[in-house]
Image (spheres, rainbow, N blue to C red):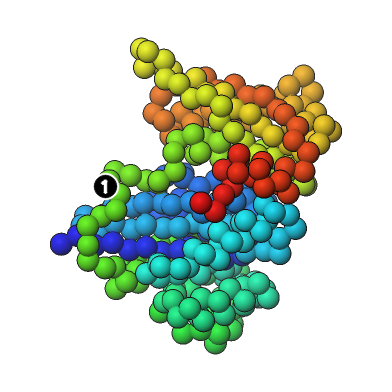
Amino acid sequence: MTKNLFAAIVGRPNVGKSSLMNCILGEKIAIVSEKPQTTRNRITGILTQGKTQYVFLDTPGMHVPRSKLGKFMVRQAGTSTADVDVVIFVTECVSPLTDIEKQMIADFAAKKVPAILVLNKIDLIENKEKMLRKIADTAALYDFAAVIPLSALTGEGVAALFEELEPFCTAGPHFFPEDALTDQPERAVVAEMIREKLLVHLRDEIPHGTAVVIEKMNEREDGSLIDIDATIVCERESHKGIIIGKRGAMLKTVLTEARIDAEELLGCRVNLQGWVKVRESWRDSEMQLKNFGYTDQ
């Protein structure tokens, strides 16, 4: 008998939601960085183990939106808890709960969605008493089905999470092929890989004002190479110069590192070319957001 589980991974920015999903899948599907609001869209990760298919929804971190893009991200996070079997609420293991985290707990408590509390980053813990206080404070707000301390970086504790997910699986046919890792098209994953490198290498606000569009992605006739053309969009002419860098050095670094990730994803050599264009205030343009794939549809 085949079984399924749909789980939404939710939390505030930078608690390690995307890192947790990548750890679970054993593959890099969601991009990660130390900057907040790295994840913009809801990303589906799929893991089939034996007769059970686990479907994880990695969501943008909840935050106070300052643009139409920010509002879209908050909607993506807020609607992800609907129609799932269980919510995985991720928080850091020792830092106090924020007001946004408390509101998130209140929201899925109001919906009466079963939830598992995950305390991430135990590999960095120095004071277990602080973690115990965090557990007590958080558990007082909702009757969590389980409490799992873990490290998305090392994988410690992830097996225990799967044990707690098992009771929420439901009988039925699988929704995705058994070898699927995500429902995202390869173009979208490669675009996110490029945006990740922008987040890693650029400072302050600049990477948050960028979007990436894959204009072309063609495999050569002999199958030896995939040609990819990408456009990086930014909001200011001054930002364009920084992204390109002196004599093109920054853009070359970004594209080289993204190419390496893309080759691992696609399993073949990649020729990745990129250009930078300015689209002022695109984060507040409904049309531009739709063009870049940030749509509720």
Residue at image location 56% in from the left, 40% down from the top: 192
* Front-most of residues 77 and 249: 77
Element type where label 1 sits in the image: loop
Q: Quadrant of the N terminus?
A: bottom left
Give the residue at the far bottom of this rendering: 140
Q: Quadrant of residue 159?
A: bottom left
User: Would you say residue 149 is visible in this rendering?
Assistant: no
Residue at image location 54% in from the left, 53% down from the top: 296
- Report x, y in % for residue 255: 61, 27
Q: Is residue 182 above or below residue 98?
A: above
Three-letter code for the amino acid on which mark 1 is drawn: Glu
Residue at image location 67% in from the left, 63% down from the top: 63
Horizontal side, residue 175 vs residue 241: left or right: left
Residue underneath mark 1 = 178
Give the residue at the far left of this rendering: 1
User: Would you say residue 76 is visible in this rendering?
Assistant: yes
Count of labels in the image:
1
Q: Is residue 225 above or below residue 204?
A: above
